[in-house]
Amino acid sequence: MKICMIGTGYVGLVSGSCFADLGNTVYCVDKDIKKINMLNSFQIPIYEPGLNEIVKKNYLAKRLIFTNNLKKAVISSDIIFICVGTPTSKNNKSADLQFVFKVAKEIASHINKFKIIVTKSTVPVSTGDKIEKIILKRKKRSLFEVASNPEFLREGEAIRDFRFPDRIIVGSDNKKVLRKLESLYEPLIKKGANFFSTNRRGAELIKYASNAFLATKISFINEIANLCEKTGVNVEDVSLGMGLDKRIGGRFLRAGPAYGGSCFPKDTKAITVTGDLYKTNLSIIKSVIKSNSDRKKLLVNRIKSILSNKIKNKKITFLGVTFKPNTDDMRESSSLLLIPYLNNNRAKVYYYDPSGFKKEFSRYKSVYFCDNLSKACNNSDLIIIHTEWDEFKTLDFKKISKNSKIKIFDMRNLYSHKKMKKNGYSYYSIGR
Ligand code: UGA
């Protein structure tokens, strides 16, 4: 099939490359010419394991085309995916849809024969109706259909999530459109992916409800972890014990720092705005947002108590600062609150992250990036394992820190509490 992805951010670039890998001809369009030039010379603007190889292979096979020529891409394609960003709006907490609507207008002006226009961007329920209206102002009803096909890719695992999805959700009332999209996904369906179709609004809401539910699961276990710490219970046992109940399921029950990233914080806020708009109080999701924000303050207090309130002049090392491993993404990472706090309280903060230097900390006087782990940990008073990168999972802390009194705060529960105590470490973790 000939398809076109408008927007070469996470969603567009990963999905576009993977669609090409399934044998389709894919035009990836972006108005940012710098980005297009980078992609045309195999420089990938995002950090996603495995993506480089797929881009190169399909580009060389001429199935993957990077261009800023939206007109040509639209004319050449049967299915057009809108994959532009929907950031949190500056005025309120809803999703800012200006890029989606702008692209819809542009697509409309180039429609020459029947096209299926699909939103992959995360958009509030009823956005498809608005896109339809925009296009109807410019083109006849018989020339297009607007469908919804939300993505469920996780950063750092996006390729695997595309190839082996739990489900593919498509929203449209048009049987022909559903059949066409089903055949696009056929190679994945054959390998076991569930294909679920509903109406357009249903698909739009499934995406928000899913992210909000996962955020709820995480906040739930994080609060239970707080109780575990007071009652001498291991939160991992609670997660495992709960997860064995198939109605609950064990995934996304790992306690840790507050959830971050570009999706959960943004989407939980946006769905509550939609709720308010439709006079429906989504009080559970509102509590989740508050719980997650409170959690960051709680972590500050925990660090203070580990250091007996003596932060000034302490060398504190962060292992990992991104919101999760296998990404360079800093958006809404807890480290963005913790590190400035420690800097302002005159600690010396050293950080090492496999994804490299972070401009977010460059304005802080006492925050230093180290390009290797040993340098970052050398003579540290406290090591904070903030992100669960694989290379942090089997460290010899006494050796790397050269401080026999080293304190370790493992925010991801990577190490066994028992073993760490046995080895004489002052070891602190989450909910244990
Ligand atoms: C999330 C969803 O998982 C994807 O399905 C969705 O497609 C994506 O948002 C999106 O809407 O685009 P992502 O933000 O990449 O994916 O990352 P997650 O793996 O979901 O992690 C989000 C946050 O939750 C991270 O800070 C992570 O550390 C935290 N988390 C996750 C936990 O604290 N505990 C867990 O058990 C799982």
Image (spheres, rainbow, N blue to C red):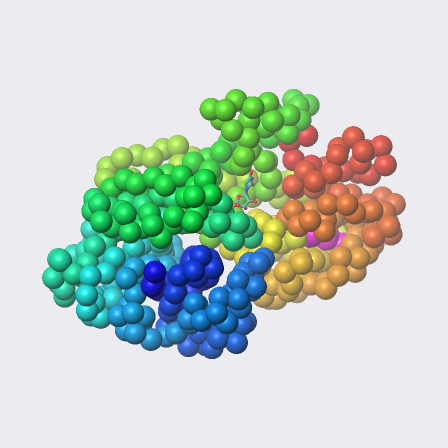
Q: Is residue 204 visible?
A: no
Total marks in image: 0
Q: Which residues are magenta?
A: 315-319
Whether the magenta-drawn stretch holds residue 421 is answered as no
Return the x and y of residue 279 as percentages of the image width and height: 24, 37
Whether residue 179 sits left or right of residue 284 in the image: it is: left
The residue lying at 72 percent from left, 51 percent from top is 391
The C terminus appears in which quarter of the rendering? top right
Return the x and y of residue 91 as percentages of the image width and height: 32, 56
User: Is 6 rendered above or below residue 233?
Assistant: below
The N terminus appears in which quarter of the rendering? bottom left
Whether the magenta-drawn stretch holds residue 318 is answered as yes
Return the x and y of residue 185 as percentages of the image width and height: 38, 49
User: Is 134 rendered above or below residue 181?
Assistant: below
User: Is 277 rendered above or below residue 221?
Assistant: below
User: Is 134 rendered above or below residue 112?
Assistant: above
The residue lying at 65 percent from left, 41 percent from top is 412
In the image, 112 versus 187, the foreground residue is 187
The residue lying at 47 percent from left, 43 percent from top is 191
In the image, 361 versus 95, the foreground residue is 95
